Amino acid sequence: MPNRDTLFSAPINKLGDWTFDAQVAEVFPDMIQRSVPGYSNIISMIGMLTERFAQPNSTIYDLGCSLGAATLSMRRHIQVDHCHIIAVDNSSAMVERCRRHIDSFRAETPVQVIEADIRDIDIKNASMVVLNFTLQFLEPDDRQLLLNKICRGMLPGGVLVLSEKFNFADQQIGELLFDMHHDFKRANGYSELEISQKRSMLENVMRTDTVETHKARLHQAGFIHSELWFQCFNFGSLIAIKDGVVR
Ligand SMILES: C[S@@+](CC[C@H](N)C(=O)[O-])C[C@H]1O[C@@H](n2cnc3c(N)ncnc32)[C@H](O)[C@@H]1O
Ligand SMILES: O=C(O)C(=O)C[C@]1(C(=O)O)C=C[C@@H](O)C=C1
């Protein structure tokens, strides 16, 4: 059983900005499962997409890998030879635990876990890139540059999976889906205090975009095709393909 997230259950005097520190890393599997509607479905489906998109002699990237859930799902589903996975996170607490977690399972495909800022790494020879709830933590001005770099480093027929929390141009829909997400958190045992303290800590750090903004960015980066393939309330996931080869 993962450690239960009770980090924000007592009142905190001075709420700082959100960070992915050791305390968060320690409870992360429970936190993300109870906070992100559809998270485990997305992780499983990333595995299914890997079966279809992983190419022999290519690299697969998991950007903002946290404890490596998407990496492990991809690794279980690779069916071609000579693929390797590069998992990247800039939180040392996450990287340390991710390495241990991945090493505790045996598999053929090599995984390199790198502690780095995803804005600074090279992307090359990629058949699949995953940004699973990571882009939303980058400064909005840096998001396009990262997507441009990913698209440049992608092989023909490569796929990007981009999962995010969304906001909505239609205010009524936005409020409804926001409230449904809060209902989801309450149903998963979070109190009003936990929900509101976490929300204020995330406020300056996690700025969300609309699905339309994501699609426009992906197109600008050079991904000819993109579509939302999963959505639950204000959370969802897009796929983007660079060229016309749909596998
Ligand atoms: C919500 S978590 C991602 C969850 C993970 N992808 C999964 O599927 O379980 C966001 C992660 O992105 C990392 N992150 C945020 N900004 C980053 C950056 N600029 N470079 C590298 N990692 C970053 C955080 O440290 C955190 O571990
Ligand atoms: O929006 C919220 O309330 C969240 O908890 C979202 C979110 C995310 O989307 O990454 C924020 C931080 C944690 O990593 C887990 C979930």
Image (spheres, grey):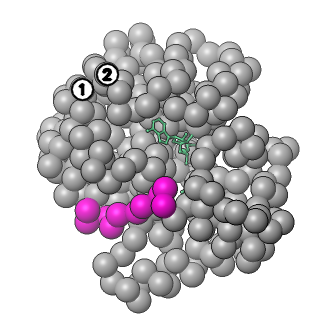
Residue at 24% across / 40% down in the picture? 145
Up the image or down, 35 lies above or below 151; here it is below
Out of 155 and 50, give the one closest to the viewer: 155
Residue 153 placement, left or right of 2:
left
Residue at mark 2 = 122
For the residue labelled by badge 2, is the local secondary structure a helix, a strand or a loop? loop
Horizontal and vertical percent for residue 89?
52, 32
Helix, strand or loop for disc 1: loop
- Say above or below: 31 vs 104: below
The answer as to whether callout 1 falls within 8 Å of ligand 1 is no
Residue 26 in sight: yes
Q: Amino acid at mark 1?
A: Gly
Choose between 32 and 8: the one closer to the eye: 8
Extreme residue toward the bottom, this view: 172
Front in this rendered view, residue 156 or 165: 165
Q: Residue furthest front?
A: 14
The disc placed on residue 76 is none
Q: Is residue 163 magenta?
A: no
**Number of other residues with Cα within 10 Å of mark 1, as a class: few under 14, some 14 to 19, many 20 or more:** some
| Image-based side of 85 in relation to 189, left or right | left
Residue at position x 42%, y 53% in the image:
136
The magenta stretch is 204-213
Residues at circles 2 and 1 in contact by the CB criterion of under 8 Å: yes
Query: In this rendering, which labeled residue sits more in front, label 2 or label 1?
Result: 2
Which of disc 1 and disc 2 is earlier in sequence?
Answer: 2
Q: Could you tell me how far apart the alpha carbons at marks 2 and 1 are, in whole angstroms?
A: 8 Å
- For badge 2, the amino acid type reads Asp
Residue at 80% x, 68% y is 11
Report the magenta stretch's main SS: loop
Classify 30 as above or below 115.
below
- List the residue tagged with mark 1: 153
Residue 188: in sight, yes or no?
Answer: no
